[in-house]
Amino acid sequence: MEPFKQTASFVIAGKRAAVEFTAERMKDRPNLTVDLQPVPPGALRFSMSGDFEGMGQIDGRLREFAGTVDDPAAARVVRLCDLWDALHMNDMSAGTRAQMHALEQMPPVPPGDDRYKAQCDYLETCGLLTDRNTRPDAPYKYGSGWLYRPAEPALVEEARAILRELDGGRIGRAVEPGADDFEEAEFSNSSDVIDSRDVVARIEYLRDYLSDLDDPTPETYDPEGDPKGDRSGAVEELATLEALEREAASAAGDWEFGETLIRDDHFEDFARDYAEEIGAINRDAMWPNNCIDWERAARELQQDYTSVQFGGVTYWIR
């Protein structure tokens, strides 16, 4: 098997999710497998990460949320999370195969308790805190190093197949078409700062809400002919947000994964906050902060940004 990097982006019940699955050649640790044998030449290290209401190890959140979605395809997302657990960081096993198998039977560790200590105590009751059986000439104490866990090629291919299947797809709905419990957006063009992921999620929500209409555009929508009532506000909002997305996404490469939109009349305050964040100033110091031309500083910073329109209001994005 050769190294690879595979990504997938999809929408589940109106929420955007993205997953990256990577395989790379082992460069250093560990030297032994979970069977206490030398790691074979060219062994691959697998890792998975993503973005779903936060970045990094999202498999727990994603699995829990997918379990609530009424769509058969959601089961594929749950299965992907199972494979995530089986494949991720396969070069960092704290125990031998026998020790890890024993820990699968361990009772849950109460919140706040020392998990590692609980694992060691449990293995000691099993006679496996030090594994003397896997390799009698080299007993291995749990947690004394990292061991390599070879991945089953079938599981790797299954994970890659699911990612291909999910990429670009939509699973479930954020809301039923014309639902009475329509939710208002948590942002508008009066907001000082907007996260692009909130815009993406709102567009998906509105598309689901209007999905029973053939052409939900302001030019063609007839509120009097809508059996579910006047939804012209949602139609107008969707058109406005889609126009914003078209313009902003072309200016920001990571639109789907989180870019910041700054309202024009807030940009000077944003510049002050940014200067403090990068260590250029100390906010608590009077001097030289009270001598800085922040209007000019904001204009200079805007050279790295692109202006976009949100319902007639100018925002800046990089």
Image (cartoon, rainbow, N blue to C red):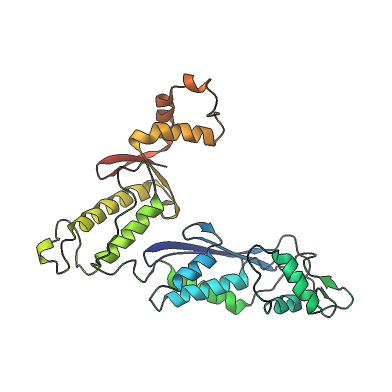
- Quadrant holding the N terminus: bottom right
In the image, is residue 79 above or below residue 3?
Answer: below
Could you say where residue 269 lies in the image, as x and y percent from the top left?
42, 33
Quadrant into which the C terminus falls: top left
Seen in the picture, residue 266 relative to 27 is either above or below; the reply is above
Residue 99 visible in this rendered orientation of the protein = yes
Q: Is residue 156 above or below residue 206?
A: below
Task: Using residue 96 as the reference point, say whether residue 218 is left or right of it.
Answer: left
In front: 159, or 221? 221
51 sits left or right of 97 in the view: left
Give the side of residue 80 with respect to residue 211, left or right.
right
Would you identify the image quadrant in which residue 118 lies? Answer: bottom right
Tell me where residue 107 appears, x and y as whole percent: 66, 76
Left/right placement of residue 218 relative to residue 187 reads left
Determine the residue positioned at 52% across, 29% down.
283
Furthest toward the left, the residue is 224
Spot occupied by residue 271 in the image (x, y as percentages of width and height): 45, 33
Q: How many circles with numbers are drawn on the protein? A: 0
Residue, x 51% and y 76% (percent of image)?
79
Residue at image location 46% in from the left, 71% down from the top: 164
Using the image, determine if residue 74 lies above or below residue 185.
below
Residue 22 quadrant = bottom right
